[in-house]
Image (cartoon, grey):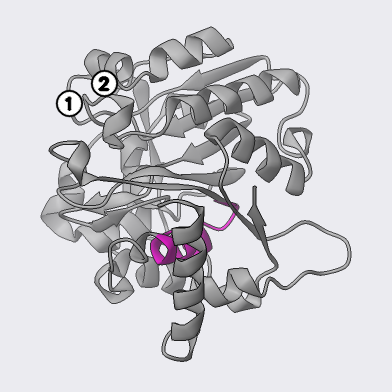
Amino acid sequence: MDRREFLKAMALAGAAAAVNPSGVGEVLAQSRTTTGGYPDLVAIMGGSPVQMLDRVLSELGGIGRFVKQGMKVTIKPNIGWDRKPEMGANTNPELVAELVRKCLSAGASEVLVFDHTCNEWTRCYQNSGIRAAVEEAGGKMVPANSEEYYREVDLPRGVKLHKAKIHQAILDSDVWFNVPVVKHHGGAKMTISMKNYMGIVWDRRVFHSTDLQQCIADINTFSKRPALHIVDCYRSVFQNGPQGKSVDDVIMLRSLIASADPVAADTAALALFSQAKPVNRETVTHIAKAEALKIGTTDLQSLNIKRIKL
């Protein structure tokens, strides 16, 4: 999706807002600003992943707002698949590496990066390009392929999921960032911020055997929330997800969305994605289920949103 196509998509989304009042096109085109404070959500398009992250963090008060001197930081991208970056199945390695550099520049004592992968973990880390990018930036990749790396936590607000084993990198961190990629998913319909939580838990079989959409909402009740959900909308698998079959399954959106609210972030990212590949939000039921659990809001018009075109 080039700049002209993006602007056309936003205009079309705005025209549809009478049917869908939470349409991201209308909200982003008529961003509500408030005096003082920071935006609830930032949506940016048109630059490289590094350029867009730099601007997003600047709009949100800088990385120093989230990371203080001596903090232990964990970053959780999507690294689930043994796929090269051009396949769009994993989070963009340039984006992850730049976030590592930002955290270290703010004085982080260490920055750990991991995912509980679906394919063989060392190949996912390597072929995604994320291992090399993270290590060059000064971060450390940690494994997540053994139960010994996880500790059980209670989820008292969960409807179907009441306990889960969470990776120690998150439990032992001072702050963590959720950095998913937006893409099609055959089971969950879409994978964005909230679905990315499945990579922080050990036993995912219960999700699939119980109620996948409800369990995704339930795991997002985990009390230690990320400082930000930074949604990679640069390169996206729009069909045959979650890993795609070829580059023909990939579309270039060249965008980035960030918010502390995962429901809002996923609502906005889904609306953007839907301009390229229409998706009925009602089929992505974990979004509404999470809103019902008061994790966040789908009412984007109630938020202070900053829209940027580079």
Spatial separation of the CA atoms under disc 2 and disc 1: 7 Å
Q: Please name whichever residue, 230 or 225, is drawn nearer the observer in this view of the structure.
A: 230
Query: How many numbered dots are placed on residues in this image?
Result: 2
- Helix, strand or loop: magenta stretch: helix
Range drawn in magenta: 258-272
Mark before the other along the chain sequence, 2 or 1: 1
Q: Please name whichever residue, 12 or 44, is drawn nearer the observer in this view of the structure.
A: 12
**Residue at image location 59% in from the left, 45% down from the top:** 228
Tag 1 residue: 119
The furthest residue to the right:
35
Tag 1: Cα neighbours inside 10 Å, few (<14), some, or many (≥20)?
some
Q: Please name whichever residue, 229 or 238, is drawn nearer the observer in this view of the structure.
A: 238
SS type, badge 1:
loop
Tag 2 residue: 124
Q: Does residue 175 lie above or below 252 as drawn?
A: above
Specify the amino acid type for callout 2: Cys
Q: Does residue 110 lie above or below 278 as drawn?
A: above
**Residue at image location 60% in from the left, 53% down from the top:** 260
Residue 92's tag is none
Asked which quadrant contains residue 42, the reply is bottom right
Cβ atoms under marks 2 and 1 closer than 8 Å: yes
